[in-house]
Image (tube, grey):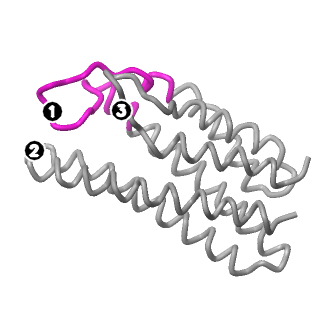
Amino acid sequence: MPIASVLTHFYWGFLLILLDFRLQGVTILPAFIGYILFAIALGRLVERSEHFRAAQKFNLPLIFLSIPSVYQPQQHTQPVDMPLGIFGILLFIAVTLLSLVVVYHIFMGLKELSESQGLEALGEEAELRWKQFLGIKLAGLFVFVLMPVPVVMFFFVIGVLILTIVLTVVIMQFISKCQNALV
């Protein structure tokens, strides 16, 4: 299977894992489907890089751990939707940490693939996109620190949301570049 069609799974997977829009507590773009798309791509790329093999190992639990986020009861006492209770917080942290590991290995696998084909600039961009993804995820974890100050937290969350949308578009453009350049 050509690499361009395999990377399409990453393209749509990133859209699903990065954007979390809800209607009446139900997510419109379920992350677990994004992780399933990652699993399909990783299964086809596993022989091309150890990074893809590592990502594959950590991605499987994410498929199941992200299912509970499909529905979260609306909480009118909080300015943003946050999972309630210690279980919800621990689940959120686990999914965040595992997604960091998976996405790191995806980007490092793409970097390795790019550099092996003499596309150093594309490899450098893969590393940059990883750092941006890490930054947005760390910002999302910082929300817990701001919980005692709801007004500040609200504006911080709005800023993170805008940056997440921008980063999603940038990552999707990067994946498109990879589709056109990698063989």
Say which element carries label 1.
Answer: loop
| Label 1 crowd bin: few (<14), some (14–19), many (20+), radius 10 Å | few
Q: Earlier in the sequence, mark 3 or mark 1?
A: 1
Q: Which residue is mark 3?
A: 90
Q: Is residue 64 left or right of residue 112?
A: left
- Seen at 77% across and 78% down, the residue is 119
Q: Which residue is mark 2?
A: 150
Q: Earlier in the sequence, mark 1 or mark 2?
A: 1
Q: Is residue 148 magenta?
A: no
| Real-space CA distance between mark 3 and mark 1, rounded to the nearest whole angstrom | 18 Å
Residue 58 screen position, x and y as percent? 63, 40
Q: Is residue 93 left or right of residue 177?
A: left
Viewer-side label of 2, 3: 2
Q: Is residue 179 above or below residue 65?
A: below
| Front residue (pair 97, 177) | 177
Q: Which residue is mark 1?
A: 78
Say which element carries label 2.
Answer: helix
Please state, as top left, top right, bottom left or bottom right, where the C terminus lies in the image.
bottom right
Residue 66 screen position, x and y as percent? 50, 29
| Real-space CA distance between mark 2 and mark 3, rounded to the nearest whole angstrom | 21 Å
- Seen at 57% across and 60% down, the residue is 171
- What's the residue type where badge 2 is placed? Pro
Q: Is residue 75 magenta?
A: yes
Which of the 4 image quadrants contains residue 147? top left
- What's the residue type where badge 1 is placed? Gln
Bounds of the magenta segment: 66-92
Residue 41 screen position, x and y as percent? 76, 44
Q: Are marks 1 and 2 in contact (CB under 8 Å)?
A: yes
Q: Earlier in the sequence, mark 2 or mark 3?
A: 3
